[in-house]
Amino acid sequence: MTPDPITVTPDVSVTDVAKIMVENNVGGLPVVSEDGELIGIVTESDLIVQDSDVKFPSYVSFLSGYVFVPGSLHRFEEKFRKAVAQTAGDVMTGHVITLEASETAEHAATLMSRKKMKRFPVMKDGALVGILTMADIVRLISRDIPVEGTEE
């Protein structure tokens, strides 16, 4: 894990978020409140939405009205919100899946695979203490360090 990760506050502009990511060669930044509480995360994927086409939700015309295909309206609203975002708070993913510092690398790797996520903020006693990325897991493997946890 990378201890003491670089963070941004919700009021940082999207342009500055992108600059910070590029300058520090990171793919995601935790978003913290003024008192340091984790409130979201901004990733490269969140920023890429800004330059992608936002397609209107799928719908079916029915009885002089429209029925949206389940889930398509929510996906549209989320992409549209991110496409017009101006700040980290606007573009961030608010529901952040985190790991506890005591979790094993095996658990983290399993979660990454199942959730198809590349990074997780690491918490200890409710405070952000680091960020664990796929690259961290690959580094363990390259050193021939077992990813599975120890049995106690």
Image (cartoon, rainbow, N blue to C red):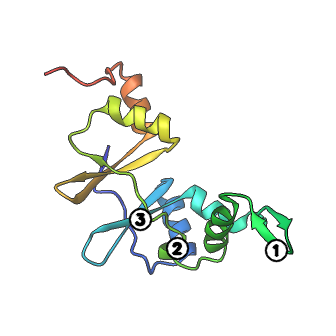
Residue in front for this viewpoint, 76 or 88:
76
The spot of residue 101 in percent (x, y) is: 23, 44
Label 1 sits on residue: 65
Q: Earlier in the sequence, mark 3 or mark 1?
A: 3
Residue in front for this viewpoint, 8 or 125:
125
Drawn side of residue 17 relative to residue 151, left or right: right
Q: CA distance from mark 2 to mark 3?
A: 16 Å
Q: CA distance from mark 3 to mark 1?
A: 37 Å
The spot of residue 108 in percent (x, y) is: 36, 36
Residue 146 falls in which quadrant of the image?
top left
Residue located at (25% from left, 53% from top):
123
* Quadrant in which the C terminus appears: top left
Residue in front for this viewpoint, 15 or 24:
15
The extreme front residue here reads 63
Which amino acid does the dot numbered 3 rest on?
Gly
Drawn side of residue 110 relative to residue 150, left or right: right
Q: In this rendering, which labeled residue sits more in front, label 2 or label 3?
A: 3
Q: Earlier in the sequence, mark 1 or mark 2?
A: 2
Which amino acid does the dot numbered 1 rest on?
Gly
Q: In this rendering, which labeled residue sits more in front, label 1 or label 2?
A: 1
Which amino acid does the dot numbered 2 rest on?
Asp
* Image height of 33 relative to 133, above or below: below
Instruction: Evaluate whether residue 124 shows in this view.
Output: yes
Mark number for residue 109? none
Residue 144 falls in which quadrant of the image?
top left
Label 3 sits on residue: 40
Q: Are marks 1 and 2 in contact (CB under 8 Å)?
A: no
Label 2 sits on residue: 16
Q: Secondary structure at mark 3?
A: strand
The spot of residue 86 in percent (x, y) is: 58, 80
